[in-house]
Amino acid sequence: LSGVACAIPGIYAARSIDSPRKRLLTYLAIPLMPCSARLPVYTLLIAAFIPNTTALGGLVGLQGLAMFGVYFFGMFCGLLVTGLVSRSRADHFTDLPFVLEMPPYRVPAWVPLLRKAWQRCKHFITKAGGIILTVTVVVWFLGYFPNVGADLGSSWLGQLGHFVGPLFEPLGLDWRYGVAIMTSFLAREVFVGTLGAMFGIESAEENMVPLVNTIQASDLGLASGLALLVFFAIALMCVSTMAILSREAGSWRLPLQMFAAYGIAGYLGALGVYQLVTLLGG
């Protein structure tokens, strides 16, 4: 559940799990939890595509219900994945019961507390900071050149967005959404700011209303909006999480496998939702 705030402390907390199998299942489930980085994306998409109306005699707002639904969907996916993987492994009967002895509660001493916090921060910076910085610099470089930041659409990143644009066309999305999705690999909430920049809206991450109005004025339908919600609920679009996973798991094999598997699952899930909603006339 700590992964609902952020996946990184949840992954660190999994160190206390003695069973390698249960630790693996925890690693698989945490990225699917609806972390706070997804919240700006959910807020934007729900505001743009879900009517601000009520149901059940005014007791339930549709937008609030949609937010609850997408949060529940992420948790359900986590339970589904861990359940399937657990039953596919032959060693699921060998685990001992989990027993945790709670220490006596005391008022914490400030010196050990600050020392421990410093050690954790230093560990994160030294172990994952280099990877995060490298990816950030690469994305900045692609978005800044060759036009020195004058137009993101004509930058190398924009050209890459045009190249991968056909991949998102089955979801009813154009290349601008492809660029925003690619930059969200730095952090999911970057999707909002990048999409705002693609539409010529400054500081969209601080004030989403102009971007919401622009999306609503475009020809993007409900099916595409719901497809984006499903994609972001499943796909592992977070370089920080992958960096920490690689350190905790001891190699890049697990995070890369999860990135590919969750990316494909997210895309196929989004495609299925898009086709279903389109078929129903959405």
Image: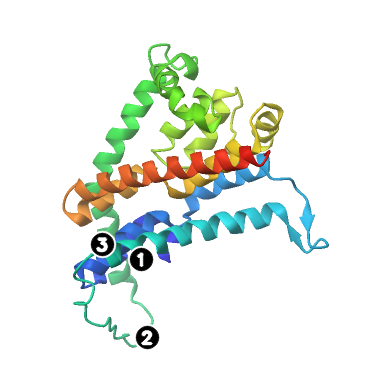
State whether residue 14 appears in this view.
no
102 to 179, vertically: above or below: below
Q: Quadrant of residue 115?
A: bottom left
Residue at the limit of the structure toward the left, as seen here: 250
Residue at the limit of the structure toward the front, as seen here: 279
Element marked by disc 3: helix
Q: Which residue is mark 1?
A: 83
Q: How many marks?
A: 3
Q: Quadrant of residue 224?
A: top right
**Which of marks 3 and 2 precedes in the sequence?**
3
Q: Which residue is mark 3?
A: 24
Residue found 37% across the figure and 41% down from its top:
264
Question: Label 3 crowding class (10 Å Cα cut-off): few <14, some 14-19, many 20+?
Answer: some
**Which of marks 3 and 1 precedes in the sequence?**
3
Q: Which residue is mark 2?
A: 105
Separation of disc 1 and disc 2 at Cα? 35 Å
Question: Hey, what amino acid is under mark 3?
Answer: Leu
